[in-house]
Image: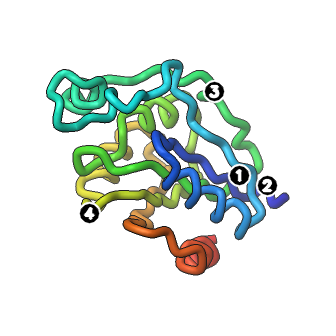
Amino acid sequence: MDNRYLTVYFSAGSNTERVAQIIAKTIDSKLHRICPREEYTREDLNWRNKESRTTIEMSDKSFRPEVTNEVVDLEAVETVFLGFPIWWYVAPTIVNSFLEANSFGGKRIVLFATSGGSGFGKTVQFLKNSVDPDTEIIEGKVFSGKIDEAEVEEFARNNM
């Protein structure tokens, strides 16, 4: 296990989790799932419903869903691969909850995301407010459609 790297992800389905698993295996890192205190149901994820949990959360960028395993040991870590699905053109605010519970000062965070068609949008801008000023956030790659394992492996190796 290479302690210089850590792969962290939030996944409400299976796509982001699958990408995170491939990255962790490729770079030989620990894998950490951001676990919401209350798991998201299918109805919570219905972005067309203005009353759904995700719509309500994402309409207020200051909202911070609770995380059950928010603190991680980052002492030896130099680079964090951080993944999530794109919601409303940014990372879900639960990712901010996780970032704000830890100190990423002097660390490098490489973002990866899954999306049905959206890019990163203003993700870096919104996440930058949740980390120490000397944290480097790199807009990595958005994976969409069928996950190509070789493409994910190449991304991981190129960002080590």
Seen in the image, is 19 located left or right of residue 119?
Answer: right
Residue drawn at the location 43% of the way across and 32% of the way down: 94
User: In terms of secondary structure, where does tag 3 sit?
Assistant: loop
Which amino acid is tagged 2? Answer: Asn
Q: Is residue 12 left or right of residue 122?
A: right
Q: Secondary structure at mark 2?
A: loop
Question: Of the numbered discs in the image, which one, if any, rests on residue 3?
Answer: 2
Residue indicated by mark 3: 69
Residue appearing at x 46%, y 39% in the figure = 12
* Residue at x-position 69% and y-position 49%: 31
In primary-sequence order, the first of circles 2 and 4 is: 2
* Dot 2 or dot 1, earlier in sequence: 2
- Rendered image quadrant of residue 41: top left
Crowding near the residue tagged with mark 2, few <14, some 14–19, many ≥20 C-alpha atoms within 10 Å: some
Asked which quadrant contains residue 114, the reply is bottom left
Looking at the image, is mark 1 or mark 3 earlier in the sequence?
3
Q: Which residue is mark 1?
A: 77
Q: CA distance from mark 2 to mark 4?
A: 33 Å
C-alpha distance separating marks 2 and 1? 6 Å
Query: Is 64 drawn above or below residue 19 in the view shown?
Result: above
Residue 88 location in percent, x, y?
Answer: 23, 45
146 or 91, which is in the foreground?
Answer: 146
Looking at the picture, how far across and down is residue 141, in whole percent? Answer: 42, 68
Find out whether the residues at labels 2 and 4 contact each other: C-beta distance under 8 Å: no
**Residue that badge 4 annotates:** 117
What's the distance in space between the residues labelled 1 and 3, CA to CA?
18 Å
Please rate how many residues cluster around mark 3, counting C-alpha atoms within 10 Å: few if below 14, some from 14 to 19, many from 20. Answer: some
Residue at image coords 79%, 55%: 3
Q: Which image quarter holds the C terminus?
A: bottom right
Q: Earlier in the sequence, mark 4 or mark 3?
A: 3
| Image quadrant where residue 55 sits | top left
Nearest to viewer (mark 3 / mark 2): 3
